[in-house]
Amino acid sequence: MLVLGIETSCDETAAALVRNGREMVSSVISSQVPIHKRFGGVVPELASREHLDKIVPVVTEAFEKANMKPSDIDGIAVTVGPGLVGSLLVGVSYAKAMAYALDKPFVGVNHIEGHIYSVAFENPPIEYPAEALIVSGGHSNIFHIPEPGKYKVVARTRDDAAGEAFDKVAKLLGLGYPGGPVIERLAREGNPKAVPFAIPRMGDGLPDFSFSGLKTAVTKYVRENGLTPVTNGEPPSQAIKDLAASFQHVVVQSLAKTMEKLALEYYPKTLIVAGGVACNGKLREECRAVAEKLGLPVYFPSPHLSTDNAAMIAAAGTVKLLAGELAGLDLNADVTLRLQNLDLEEEAAKRAGVRYRL
Ligand code: KG4
Ligand code: ZN
């Protein structure tokens, strides 16, 4: 089964051809980072205009690279949400028009579900139940996945997403956008114990994340210690490198420790870590250590599949198309689409002998 994936939820226009949900035939990503860089974040109006410009050449290139033609595909999968409305609409409208013109089935895919399927390519098949940490610029969640397509959010961020925190702290320190890669690079030369930031914990005891307080703590530290943000590409001071390392350390600890805590509660057979922040080497290291401690396999997408791409959308869409989950021409973008369709209590009652501590 050959599926065309289309992704335009944020600032990447992407198209990919994927065979049988696991084999990448071609993948094209047109990044808008250079356009949004000078604003320190994504400007929605510029993003949708750029998607309009790029969608046709990107899809065309995906077919050219694969040496295939549109009539070769068996279906189309497109991101329907969550994301920026103007951006999502470009992909959704294009996919609908193409499906109609070719008379092919198509399906809408949740962007977060796409990130989960980004591990489908270079890893063994996922064994369920699985636990997935999805960390990107817009999301920080841990999902309990008892079987394919069933999701329960077991940890979420109360404020900023992890990637957003990297981006905001980088902006504050004058390091540019996106913040994750540059903070990771500087952190390699810094001392992660230099600034003892506390891991944010919830007053109500739930295993959720919170990163905005950390951003405030970084701001306060910069002010109180008279640190000057980096300007005009000057080399960053050791104090900035130490601060970057300390910030990264506490974010990584918060994510990895929560993953461990929840694994001890839900007994997954596989751990998954995906989304843009999963590019982070320290996060991978910590999650590998957690997996080893628990005796579980942990799957990461390779870096080009960690950030937004269309191959992951095609992989997730293949499962839906095979299950006969088809969309109609009334399919619409859903900016606040959530990924949760499971009532754990109901599920626990159905599975005699399996107990969940709720
Ligand atoms: O998944 P993605 O491409 O887009 C969203 O769906 O948000 O993730 C982008 C996010 C950005 O916030 C970026 O700073 C972060 O992923 N990121 C990183 C790293 N590479 C990208 N964060 C930490 N360390 C990295 N190496
Ligand atoms: Zn994403």
Image (cartoon, rainbow, N blue to C red):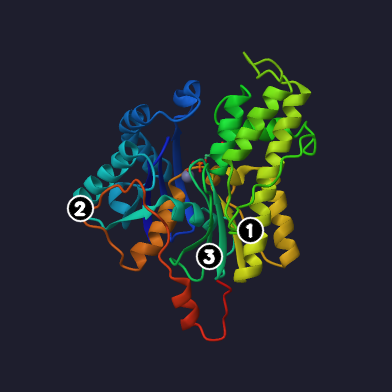
- Does any portion of residue 106 appear in the rendered image? yes
Q: Secondary structure at mark 3?
A: strand
- Of mark 3 and mark 1, the one earlier in the sequence is 3
Instruction: Give the side of residue 293 with respect to residue 1, left or right.
Output: right
CB of mark 3 near ligand 2 (< 8 Å): no
Question: Which amino acid lies under the numbered mark 2 shown in the image of this protein?
Answer: Asp
Question: Which amino acid lies under the numbered mark 3 shown in the image of this protein?
Answer: His
Q: Secondary structure at mark 2?
A: loop
Task: Give the vertical position of 172 relative to 211 (above or below).
Answer: above
Q: Residue 248's x, y, as percent? A: 68, 39
Q: CA distance from mark 1 to mark 2?
A: 38 Å
Q: Residue 347's x, y, as percent? A: 46, 76
- Does any portion of residue 180 appear in the rendered image? no
3 and 2 marks in contact (CB < 8 Å): no
Q: Disc 2 marks which residue?
A: 330
Q: Disc 1 marks which residue?
A: 259
The image quarter containing residue 231 is: top right
Give the label, 3 or 2, closer to the camera.
3
Q: Residue 90's x, y, as percent? A: 29, 39
Instruction: Give the side of residue 247 with respect to residue 116, left or right.
Output: right
Residue at 72% in and 40% down:
197
In-front residue for pair 149/224: 224
Residue at 59% in and 36% down:
166
Instruction: Give the side of residue 253 with respect to residue 113, left or right.
Output: right
How many residues crowd mark 2 within 10 Å: few (<14), some (14–19), many (20+)?
A: few
In-front residue for pair 61/252: 252
Question: Which amino acid lies under the numbered mark 1 shown in the image of this protein?
Answer: Met
Q: Disc 3 marks which residue?
A: 144
How many residues crowd mark 1 within 10 Å: few (<14), some (14–19), many (20+)?
A: many
